[in-house]
Amino acid sequence: MTTSVYWILLAGWLLAGRACAQPSVFSQEWQFAHYLADKEEVDEASFVLQSIDTRQLSRPQLDSLAYLTGWLAYSGKSLELASQHLLSVSSGSPFYIKSQYFGAYCLTFQQKLDAASAVARQLPAPDSTLRELRAFEEAGIALLQRQFQRYDTLRQQFRYSSYALSAEEKHLDSYRAGLQAQKRRSPAVAGLLSAVVPGLGKLYAGKPKQGIAAFLPVLTLGLLTWEGYRKDGPKSLRFLGFGSLFTLFYGGAIWGSTLAVHVQRDQFNRTYDNKILFDMHIPLRNLLNR
Amino acid sequence: MITRFCLICTFLCVTCLTGRAQSRLQTADSLYTSGQFLAARVAYERAIFMSSDPGEQFTAALGKVQCLKQQGLYAASVPFLNSQLQLLYPDSLLYRLRYEQILCAYLAGQFENTLSLLDRLPYLHPTVRATPLLLAIRILALNELQRWQEAQLHFRELLSALPDSATTRQDPYQHLPQLKNAKKAQWLATFIPGAGQLYAGKPGEAALSILVQSAGLYFGLTSFLQGYYLSAWGIGAGLFGSFQAGGVRRTDVLIREVNTRRANAFNTQVRQQILTLVR
């Protein structure tokens, strides 16, 4: 009798062990992938996550999977994939807050500003720090959209006292001032200036070196044309050849000046956009990447 | 009865655990053998993650390094081995990992890092003598950095560490590559048209440079003499000046190419000789 009890106990223990092992397979695989992600072994971690059979996973497990897949894509700078996965994490997940904030940031970085703004308005903010962070992220997006009034409304929520936010909040304020102070140059004026003095339009556009580089060949060709005209007459090959080249370079200088205004404006905007994106990222990493 | 029951349980547990460990490594090994290196890397990582046995972790770490090497991912092996060196392995196993790390650093082209890792080895493992292969790697890394005089000293050390028959071989450092002097080339190119390219071993380019600069000069002079002062300046002097400045820059590029080629040829020859010695 006693022997059979022991054997039944043993069999029961073995069966229980097997049964317990089944549901933990996902958890084990997820933890393993997380361990690989922490070691920045993105290829290996992605391989593990892709091998997981998603058909029988519960909602929380799917959320955890979406979070880690999104996080790996974010680490690998595949931001479209990252935003898709991170924003699919449901509100019941412990990764919900982090996923939403980083998902919104990924959308912002991809310049999908309307979508990012819509997500940012819905960002979860259970405490005052996260409320300030949400306002900060929304303000960053507003600046990227050049919506200065909206930025001014949102910045009223800045407290300039949090270690994780204060420096970046001040930076955003300075970017706002810089963007507001941007001088609006006209391509037509630049072209007109270059028509008067070749290269002057580029100087006006904010590219003085390019202005000098445009002025010198036009001046040289102009002088050579004049010399050809003076010495050999208007029908001479010298005059016609240099005259054609001068016309080409002169027209190029005018066209280049109108383009320079656009280029300079794009560069200015890109520089500020990069600064804003950089500053939007720092508090996210400091507050949520733990 | 209870004792018997406990013994059976213990037996089952131990069999199960060691069986799992062996099976993990066997799976990884079979993936490696079948050429599925990424899957094998994951399987070896899994063994490291799941196991608490340093022996299994060490075998798995070496397995993963082999996979990375097969895939040519030498640079990735270096930080991976660094992470493994943080674990509590016995000294002999740590030495093996460091040895692998040095090899991978060299294969990844991280020559300064290779030398730094080699320099640390005697302090970390004072009782272990440097193997001929490690000496060879030091020489090869020094060669790549063009520190041939230091490499020569270590070459002699390598010869003395090898059996007598090898010491009769010729010292390749007696004929170091003759590298061109970049400053001299620049000076020549600045003051004598085409001389820089000629010094760099490109007579065709030198002739072309002389021709174009002479044409510019000729056009400038004749234009000046005919009273076309602006043409003389704008075209003649412009052409001459542009090609003269371009010649100086081109000479610099050519000298670098020539020196790299000569250094590579010498290093390849020495590498072959050294590998024959240590094989």
Image (cartoon, rainbow, N blue to C red):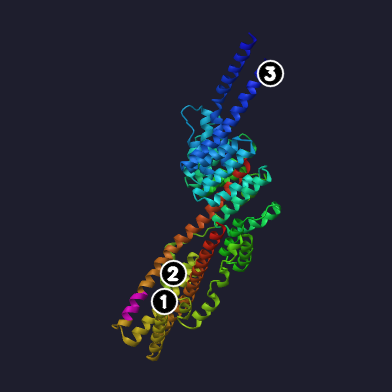
Q: Which mark is residue A193?
A: 2
Which residue was labeled with disc 1? B205
Which residue was labeled with disc 3? B3
As drawn, which residue projects farthest toward the front? Answer: B165
Marks 3 and 2 share the same chain:
no
Tell which of A114 and B38 is nearer to you.
Answer: B38
Q: Are marks 1 and 2 in contact (CB under 8 Å)?
A: no
Residue range corresponding to the magenta coloring: A239-246
Q: Which residue shows up at 39% across the image and 91% down it? A: B225
Tell which of A232 and B151 is nearer to you.
Answer: B151
- Name the amino acid, label 2: Leu
Tell which of A207 and A86 is nearer to you.
Answer: A86
Q: Position of residue B131 (x, y in %)?
A: 63, 55
Q: Which residue shows up at 59% across the image and 39% down it? A: B48
Examine the rendered structure and indicate whether residue B63 appears above or below residue A208: above
Tell which of B50 and A125 is nearer to you.
Answer: B50
